[in-house]
Image (cartoon, coloured by chain):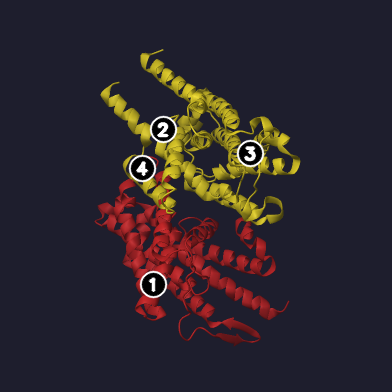
Amino acid sequence: MDLSFIFVQIISGLTVATFLFLVASGLTLIFGVVDVFNFAHGSFYMLGAYLGYQIISYWHVNFWAALFLASIWVGILGMAMEFFFLRRIYGRAEEGGFQILLTYSFILIIDDVVKMIWGTEYKTIERPAGFSGSIKIGSAILPSYYLVIIIIGLLLVVLSWLILNHTRPGKIARASAIDREMLGILGVNVPLTMTTVFGIATALGGMSGILAAPLRSVTPGAGIEVIIDSLIVVVLGGMGNFWGAWVGALIIGEVNSFAVAYVPKWASLFNYLS
Amino acid sequence: MSLKRLNNRIFLAGIVVLLFLLPFMKVSEYVVILMNEIIVWGLFALAFNLLFGVSGMLSFGQALFYGFGAYVTGLMVIHFGAFWFIPSILIGMTAVIAISILLGLITIRLSGVYFTMLTLAFAQLGWEIVFKWYSFTGGDDGIQGIYPPDFLGTPKAYYYFSLILVLLSVWIIRKFVNSPYGLTLRCLRQNPIRVSFLGRKVKNYQLGVYVVSAIFSSLAGSLMAGINGSIHPGMLNWTTSGEVILMSVLGGIGQFFGPFLGGGVIVLIEDIIGAYTEYWSFIIGIIMLLIVLLFPKGVLGEFSKLRRRLKI
């Protein structure tokens, strides 16, 4: 075992961590601000991947445009879900259980809708032009697309931090996590805030789906795998804690990456162990 | 005994008699098997509802205990012969006590969404193990050819066997829910803090109901293994947990027999619609959505509301 091997594993762990972080940060954002556990978050990841595929293969736009468009679409769908359905059960007795059931029903519906539209075969998205090759760092050979993903992930982390901590919308989002009623009295449109946060969070999930699509093939049911992994990430980092999600994603990503290298068959068990 | 209660008793007795007479009516073997599935699912839903409807703990991992029972029965019958079918049911129910105490000690430390997620994570862990441990559990292929002993060989005989066990369990569960212990559980659902003020150890009660629910889930799993003679890892998957939740919510979590009814309805719908479409989970999803949004009390709950309004 040499150093370059470890280096490659670390980098590939980082890419996994980036995907997980994008999904998990949305999950934790929704939990923190809207106080909903969005079980269907993984389904938005899957929707993102499929919409990205659709946009690229039918409209022949480039990868980056598709990434942008599909994320926005997924965000709009997420907002629609909050606006038309979730909003109706806020404040009901035993809300927690019914939230889980409602979002669970969305997993089932979205899964089958995807099957109806795109069928059950594997879909793939090509890596974006210019990043299909690999680059050499020292003696290690790395797919350049991995680096792209890690850079995008880092950019998003910094951007989220700036927005959450240094802008007025970020302040409002943080405030509504603490006391919704007070925020409403101060003249903030709380329902709109919640819908917007839901949209941003699901857009992040969708973006992660498209970014992951060139590496893992897109299949129906992908949403379910993703939600359980990101759940572990979120629980590991503390529910509703943005930075916790980041650390959790890093841990799970690296553990997963090394486990796949050494004991591929049992790799997924390590997630549960940690 | 009030007239209404008497009425209810006569109604229940009628249903039990109907269930016993079913194989004698001119029905095909297929109907008997379907009915068998309904009562076993009903038992599973009832066991699940001990957690959600009675104690207010939404577990998304009951499939673990259900699948455990099924695999204990399946593996024992395959390896040691059909004689072990009945003992294996008891062994499964005993072993699941140990497992559920162990898991319960971890899961009930959390409440609300965290409890749900932790139970889900443990169940998925169990599913992974069954799915991947090919040499022992048969992995994705599952196990086929689990035959109960000869005297239970026909669908009719097996139906009576499971009907008696299910009715016995229903009776025990009902006694359990109506006992002081069950009353405390129902209080827990409404206000755990106040229960602890009354000097009850909340966690002990939660652990107790978790174990009881696991025992009957395991029984349901074992019985299910005998109906089709085959088991598969999907029985431990979270879709199974989801289905049993849907049954309970559809029937009505606040009513004792709600989950049982919901189980029957779902199995029937699955049987009828499953022949026409492969998009089964889409339909389940829509049903769940409508119930959560419009009829959170479930079919029986809405029915009894209606009855109260009409004063009958």
| Of the image marks 2 and 3, the number of the one nearer the N terminus | 3
Chain of the residue displaying label 4: B
Q: Amino acid at mark 2?
A: Gly
Q: Amino acid at mark 1?
A: Gln
Do circles 1 and 4 both sit on a common chain? no
Q: Which chain is yellow?
A: B
Secondary structure at badge 3 equals helix
| Of the image marks 3 and 4, the number of the one nearer the N terminus | 3
- Would residue A264 be found to the left or right of residue A243 on screen? right
Give the residue at the far top of this rendering.
Answer: B1
Q: Does residue B204 show up?
A: no
Numbered disc in front, either 2 or 3: 2
Q: Colour of chain A?
A: red
- The residue wearing badge 1 is A54
Q: CA distance from mark 2 to mark 4?
A: 14 Å
Q: CA distance from mark 1 to mark 3?
A: 49 Å
Give the residue at the far left of this rendering.
Answer: A187
- The residue wearing badge 4 is B291
- The residue wearing badge 2 is B254
Q: In which quadrant of the rendered image does the C terminus of chain A lie?
A: bottom right
Q: Local crowd at mark 2 within 10 Å, few (<14), some, or many (≥20)?
A: some
Q: Local crowd at mark 1 within 10 Å, few (<14), some, or many (≥20)?
A: some
Chain of the residue displaying label 3: B
Chain of the residue displaying label 2: B
Q: CA distance from mark 1 to mark 4?
A: 33 Å
Q: Local crowd at mark 3 within 10 Å, few (<14), some, or many (≥20)?
A: some
Point out residue A180 in the picture as x, y percentages from the top left corner.
33, 52
| Of the image marks 2 and 4, the number of the one nearer the N terminus | 2
Q: CA distance from mark 2 to mark 3?
A: 26 Å
Point out residue B52 in the picture as x, y percentages from the top left corner.
47, 38
Q: CA distance from mark 3 to mark 4?
A: 33 Å
